Amino acid sequence: MSEGPAIGRDEWVARADEIIERHRLLGLADRVPGWARLLAFVVAVAAIPLITDDGYVNSVVFDTLVFCLLALGLNVAVGWGGLLDLGYIAFFGFGAYTYAILSSDKFGLHLTSPLVLVIVLVLGALLGFLVGLPSWRLVGDYLAIVTLFAYQIFISLVTNGHDLFGVDLTGGVNGISDLDPFDVFGFELPVSHRGIFNSNYVYVALVLFVAVFGALHLINHSRIGRAWRALREDTLAAELMGMPTDWLKLLAFAFGASVAAMTGSLFASLKIGVFPETFSLTLLITVYAMLILGGVGSQTGAVLGAVVVYVFLEALRNADVSGWVFYLAVVLALLYLLRPRWMVAVVLAATVAFGFVAHAVAGAIDESWTAGAPPDAGAVTRALDVWVAIPASPGDAKPVAYVVLIALLLVTTVVTGVRRYALLVPTLYLAAFVWETVLAPQPDVTRFALLGALLVGIMITRPWGILGERRVEIV
Amino acid sequence: MSDRPLLELRGVSMAFGGLRCLDGLDLHVGHGEIVSVIGPNGAGKTTLFNLITGVYEPTSGDILFEGRSITGLPPHRIAQLGIARTFQTLRLFLNMSVRENVMAAAYGHTKAGVFRSMLRTPGMRREEKEIRELAEKRLAFFGDRLVGYRWDQPAYSLSYANRRRLEIARATATNPKLLLLDEPAAGMNPVETREITELIAKLREEGGYTILVIEHDMHVVEGISDRVVALDHGVKIAEGSFEEVATDPRVIEAYLGARAVERT
């Protein structure tokens, strides 16, 4: 294999063989057919409610499936059609509000949920056509701006929808409450049993997930899917090869919109009510992050991205987990950045030694400087209490330490050689201090910062996402 | 076959603001003919292709294909009627496989819609198989250059000459009657250039296409053309056999300047 390309075979083929060979050695991942991977995922998800009746775990599983569906829908317009759609969450909200209107006391309508899903599928597609219309004239950033306006129009409409020409349609900022739970032709699924999440919702979401995943897979491997990808690559060439690109763009928008709207209905059926602030830009960015992380254009990637990001975000609510993630991330970053690799061990050892000295010195000056972690801190923090000098009341030290840390980090990028290694030691120690005093106590902010760090890390090493296809823009 | 030409341009003009790229151009291409369009850079050759394929709509004049006006039709309709083209600056679907590039171009003459695709009806499966076979057949036209392991390579991994070949294969997958080739030999080495000359003749022979070609390489033009049309500043300055056009003083002037004509 190592003799290089043989005569009559070009480098690409030689390399392809090598890659195939390596995969054969590494494992089965690539040889497992798509349906088997889907089946494995479905079985694994379906097993969770059987293993545990923990309501929190099952509700996380449900929400993860909701995000999987959202990422799959977004992938149609963005990944296959190449159309940057920033109005996507409006479709999700539209589905949720439509469910609320058709299935609550608001107008006394109590339609059965499958019927609502069909209505939402059709209306969502129509809305997708409408929002997709600007794509006839606009591409790229310009289309993104206009679709973002479409999202703003949606938010304005639902926020002021308590008085639309004298009709109270959406309940304004108060939203619509007391929605019917999901029901299948009269057979109702109560949201909770004695306060515990009804795990049957996981199965409802799973059925929708399989249906959507399968339908999108089939459409992608048909002439329409090929045409979508062709128009993503070169719209003019696609048009000149006989593909009606305007229609195909609308179709891509409609598919994404239908999926998002149905997901919205499913999501609403579980909630007490729907409110405008649920459909925030943060949600949009999160779904985009999932798709980009997993790999734009890949269905498996979209699902993987949704699972990774959502489970990651949920897990980081726990101080123990976030502590581990932070320190692990620091070590991984050092491994990635420092050469030769054994320097990592040297720097870490020096940091540990530096920490004990700093802790002892601080303790000797004033007992209260090392008075320690708050009692509700995680296990990692308590374990590190002998090493990181955590004052009883950090107070002003916190912002100062934060600013100094950023300054030190910047300086380490400028200096070279031994000085950089020497500087890294106090920098790492300060990072631990800042983490324990500033970041760890605020998981709601920190978890998004850590997600950002994860995204940056993956985008540097794999710009096309975990499972995305490597893209070449200009050759 | 009627004796009406396959493609006919009647007094076609194109202006971008004050810039007249084509001025009252009359042109006809008969069934089975190979016609070359030559002219210096900026003469309006590619604009002519863009007008025929519907990228632009002419400012005035009419374009007829099989006796029917195609002026103002959207490009994909024109492609479906039977006009396909390649591009001077290659425009492949770079991140799709070689085979998919060709399969995508079969869109216009295939039917399976959204629902049939999602339900995988027998008709849809049959059609999909036909598209795949069509693509492999079109790629096999170039010998063993674009077959076998190349089918699944992404288009961006191809060499320049192979990309030009893939563009031609993709254009023929639309099942055209008229094939517009925009500088098929540009950027090719002498061997490849000779090959493309033979290839264009073979395209007509085996595919039955009528061909309109823009080319700068005079060896290619001489080798393939039934008729040559010379353009300069958007006006037709000469038309006829290669010898007639190549010796026409106006053509020599357009290419080499007025003093060159005096010397001959």
Image: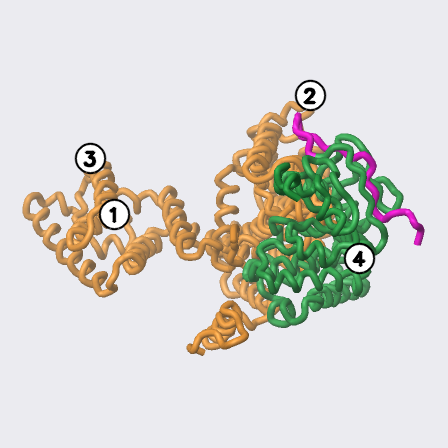
Chain colours: A orange, B green
Task: Give the distance between the C-alpha atoms of the residues marked 3 and 1, in whole angstroms.
Answer: 27 Å
Q: Is A36 situated above or below A281?
A: below
Task: Give the distance between the C-alpha atoms of the residues marked 4 and 2, in whole angstroms.
Answer: 65 Å
Foreground tag (3 vs 1) = 1
Q: Amino acid at mark 3?
A: Asp
Q: Position of residue B122 (x, y in %)?
A: 80, 65
Mark number, residue B160: none
Disc 4: which residue: B209
Q: Mark 4 vs mark 2: tell me if same chain.
A: no
Q: Amino acid at mark 4?
A: Tyr
Is residue B11 found inside the magenta-colored segment of the image? Answer: yes
Q: Position of residue A70 (x, y in %)?
A: 58, 49
Q: Residues within 10 Å of mark 3 (few under 14, many from 20)?
A: few
Q: Residues within 10 Å of mark 4 (few under 14, many from 20)?
A: many
Camera-side residue of A340 and A183: A340
Foreground tag (2 vs 3) = 3
Disc 3: which residue: A396
The answer for which chain carries disc 1 is A
Task: Give the distance between the C-alpha atoms of the residues marked 2 and 3, in whole angstroms.
Answer: 54 Å
Q: Residue at x 69, y 65 (%)?
A: B139
Q: Amino acid at mark 2?
A: Gly
> Which of pointers 2 and 3 lies earlier in the amino acid sequence?
2
Disc 1: which residue: A413
Disc 2: which residue: A166
The answer for which chain carries disc 2 is A
Which stretch is magenta?
Answer: B1-21
